[in-house]
Amino acid sequence: MTLEPPTSRPISGESNRTPSTETEETPRPFLPWLGRACRQAREERGVVQVQIAAALRVNQATIARFEDGTAWPRRPEEVLMAYARELSIDVRLLWLHAFVFWLENEPVLDQESQEQIEAALGRLSPPEGGG
């Protein structure tokens, strides 16, 4: 499945209900894919954004911005741990899913790197006929 890369920009300003977000323009090509992975896992399990927001004590809009890749939490580990708890899954699956999204969808500059990435993704696939 090919996805359009999320467009990311930090949000300026802070509130006492919303985790701090970075205000400087720092390239963070991986973080938007974390939001995508969390959204997909949440939707597959039928959990609503409000439930994740309540677990983090933030508003639903904060979760929507994270999932859309338009805001970055200062502590993404805490956010992913909340998703993992609420979705009853291992947090490593969220990180791995985001990493695979990133590798599959971001452009690679040279053919050798592309081949190395494809080989690495192949090693992540379960063996045929087993599981």
Image (cartoon, grey):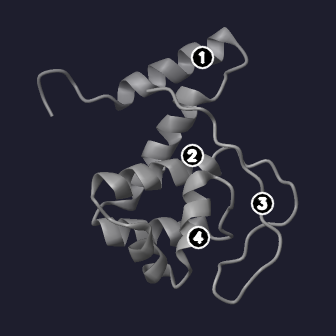
Q: Amino acid at mark 3?
A: Pro
Quarter of the view holding residue 114: top right
Image position of 59 with respect to 67: above or below? below
* Number of residues whose C-alpha sits closer than 10 Å to that of mark 4, classed few (under 14), some (14–19) or many (20 or more): few
User: Of marks 1 and 4, which one's residue comes earlier in the chain?
Assistant: 4
Quarter of the rendering occupied by the N terminus = top left
Q: Amino acid at mark 2?
A: Trp
Look at the numbered disc 1 and give the secondary structure of its residue: helix
Q: Residue at x 40, y 49 (%)?
A: 40
x and y percent of residue 65 in the render? 62, 61
Q: Residue at x 69, y 70 (%)?
A: 74
Q: Residue at x 73, y 85 (%)?
A: 15
* Number of residues whose C-alpha sits closer than 10 Å to that of mark 3, classed few (under 14), some (14–19) or many (20 or more): some
Name the residue tied to disc 1: 114
Q: Amino acid at mark 1?
A: Gln
* Number of residues whose C-alpha sits closer than 10 Å to that of mark 1, classed few (under 14), some (14–19) or many (20 or more): some
x and y percent of residue 44 in the render? 30, 51
Name the residue tied to disc 2: 33
